[in-house]
Amino acid sequence: MSRATKLWPLLTGTQRYEKIVSTRNRGQGVYIDAPILAFLIETPNGRILYDVGCDYRKIATPELRRRFFEPMRPVFEPPQMSEEQRIPRYLHRLGLTVKDIDVVFLGHLHFDHAGGLCEIPGCEVHVHRQELAAARSGRDGGVFGDEIAAAEGWRIQSEGYELAAGVRALLTPGHTAGHMSLLIELPHGRPVVLCGDAADLQENLDDEIAPGFCWDDNETLALQSIRLLKSLAHSEGAELWPNHDFTFFRGLRPFPAWHD
């Protein structure tokens, strides 16, 4: 069976926010620091990025920073992102350029997952149909309109599917309307499930607690997706990787080391 060959977690920035963002009705008044992650996946058929982090320009330019992020206070502090955390910089350290990326797979369209598309021009982009429809509705405050302006050229999906050899897209809605996770089969280690924001923290998985923000306030759907991921991990012998958990992230191999 063909499998992905390497998996790199990329720390593309950090954000401080009230914990109720990640754990529904739990953590009011408690602020946590969270990693903003993307993942580079090498397969026999090409390279995939799962998410792309924030738009660096919106963080580094004071006027844009004020316009986009100040309205999110006090629940969200503006993200922090260094030059070295931009995806092209990570690729350069591996001897690659953005032209070496074959597919960008967006788990969902919030700014900390889709904003960095501007640094990867011309790449094939995959996103779920319901995710894009919800983003275009203007009802999701986590989506910045300019970051989905090129969506007419994207590859729009309607269900789970085989993205590449050893990489399976999983429909895990709840946090957003068309959220998707990834199951990655590796040649040596256990399979890995990139939960995306279906599970920000290990706590979401352990306690089966929904994210703080659920599309249409549908907590039930979000919990169904968490249980789906846990069931899949059990049946596949896979690891579940939560998306915004610093304790978990610090236990992974630091870049440029990879998981295989």
Image (spheres, rainbow, N blue to C red):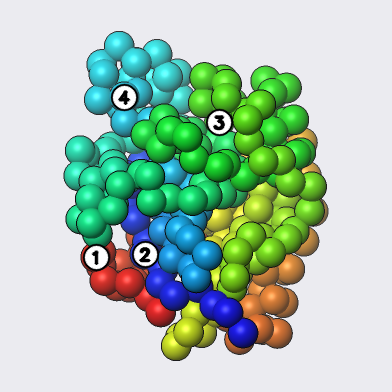
- Tell me the SS state at disc 1: loop
Mark identifier at residue 77: none
Tell which of 66 and 55 is nearer to you.
55
Tell me the CA gap for discs 4 and 3.
17 Å
Place of residue 231 in the rendered image (x, y in percent of width and height, measured from the top left): 72, 77
Place of residue 64 in the rendered image (x, y in percent of width and height, measured from the top left): 34, 15
Q: Residues within 10 Å of mark 2 (few under 14, many from 20)?
A: many
The residue where tag 3 is placed is: 142
Task: Kindly tell me whether residue 55 is visible in this rendering.
Answer: yes
What kind of residue is marked 4? Arg
Q: Residues within 10 Å of mark 4 (few under 14, many from 20)?
A: some
- Tell me the SS state at disc 3: loop
The residue where tag 2 is placed is: 8
- Vertical order, 215 against 172 (above or below): above
What kind of residue is marked 1? Pro
| Circles 1 and 4: CB atoms closer than 8 Å | no
The residue where tag 4 is placed is: 57
Tell me the CA gap for discs 2 and 3.
26 Å
The residue that appears at 49% across and 56% down in the rendered structure is 48
The residue where tag 1 is placed is: 256
Position of 200 compared to 89: left or right? right
